[in-house]
Image (tube, rainbow, N blue to C red):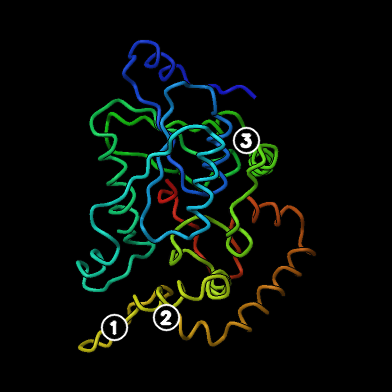
């Protein structure tokens, strides 16, 4: 498959030798497959990983594995201030789908600081079968996002094939969760929180420690609206039973409906929102 860049990007690449080509990695399947797909297309390709300091061990493991495969350095970017600093700064208010301050402060700011004012082509791993996702689009004039998978009609089955044929496979956390991200990502489905509890009980406890009830107002700061992780854990069996029942229903569902679920990447019966479209740098 040949990468087709739009004409203005080709022109800028030819006329300005100072343009930087940067591919940001999340430790997930799409950005990793894009790195494999783009390998060798640009000699000066830069790879970066925005480390929040709250990633899974499996994520760090996969980034190291990917670096060995690419035979190229992956620059690890990290905020000067850690997650706890910002929790305290925001008076204990945890990030959610509306604020997403974790994305803004721990990923986007380090990434844009790394870029500075240099003209950059930023390669984004949004697939052709993800019409709902916009990906990272900077407000900075010097950053031009491109979407090779969209331009070349690369879909989920192609991504899986790219990773399998490369020998990389997928990160181990896909055994119990559906996407990359911090271990306490608020976009996790409830079954994925149970997966975290089973796979990494110490991280589940660490996530619980961030939750609190304001003594003065009684306001609850929890990862899931209306339910603490303690409460969620108490109904773990029920959550997993409901998940298995949904899987059974989906096997018998109209195939077109199942295809929509594959494209959108979430379980509508679970009442979960779509994953963050910009945090997966």
CA distance for labels 3 and 2 = 38 Å
Quarter that holds the N terminus: top right
Q: Which residue is mark 3?
A: 154
User: Distance between the Cα atoms at labels 1 and 2?
Assistant: 10 Å
Relative horizontal placement of residue 185, taking residue 68 as reference (left or right): left
Place residue 245 in its image quadrant. bottom right
Residue 239 percent across, percent down from the top left: 61, 79
Q: Residues within 10 Å of mark 1 (few under 14, many from 20)?
A: few
Mark earlier in primary sequence (1, 2) = 1
> Which residue is tagged 2?
226
- Secondary structure beneath label 3: loop
Where is residue 100 shown, x and y percent of the image? Answer: 34, 59
Q: Earlier in the sequence, mark 1 or mark 3?
A: 3
Label 1: which secondary element: loop
Describe the element under mark 2 as helix, strand or loop: loop
User: Neighbour class for label 3 at 10 Å: few (<14), some, many (≥20)?
Assistant: some
Per the image, the residue denoted by label 1 is: 219
């Amino acid at each position: 498959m040949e990468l087709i860049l739009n004409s203005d990007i080709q022109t800028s690449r030819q006329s300005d030798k100072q343009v930087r080509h940067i591919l940001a990695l999340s430790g997930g399947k799409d950005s990793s497959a894009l790195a494999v797909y783009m390998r060798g297309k640009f000699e000066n390709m830069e790879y970066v990983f925005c480390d929040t300091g709250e990633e899974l061990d499996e994520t760090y493991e996969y980034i190291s594995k990917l670096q060995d495969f690419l035979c190229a350095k992956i620059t690890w970017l990290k905020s000067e201030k850690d997650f706890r600093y910002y929790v305290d700064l925001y008076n204990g208010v945890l990030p959610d789908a509306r604020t997403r301050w974790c994305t803004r402060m721990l990923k986007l700011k380090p990434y844009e600081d790394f870029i500075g004012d240099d003209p950059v082509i930023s390669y984004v791993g949004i697939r052709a079968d993800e019409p709902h996702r916009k990906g990272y689009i900077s407000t900075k004039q010097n950053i031009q996002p491109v979407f090779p998978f969209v331009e070349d009609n690369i879909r989920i089955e192609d991504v899986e094939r790219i990773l399998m044929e490369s020998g990389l496979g997928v990160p181990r956390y896909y055994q119990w969760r559906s996407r990359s991200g911090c271990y306490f990502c608020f976009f996790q489905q409830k079954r994925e929180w149970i997966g975290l509890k089973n796979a990494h009980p110490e991280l589940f406890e660490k996530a619980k420690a961030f939750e609190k009830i304001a003594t003065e107002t009684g306001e609850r700061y929890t990862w899931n609206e209306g339910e603490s992780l303690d409460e969620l854990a108490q109904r773990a069996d029920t959550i997993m039973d409901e998940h298995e029942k949904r899987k059974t229903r989906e096997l018998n569902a109209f195939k077109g409906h199942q295809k929509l679920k594959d494209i959108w990447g979430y379980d509508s019966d679970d009442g979960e929102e779509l994953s963050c479209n910009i945090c997966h740098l």
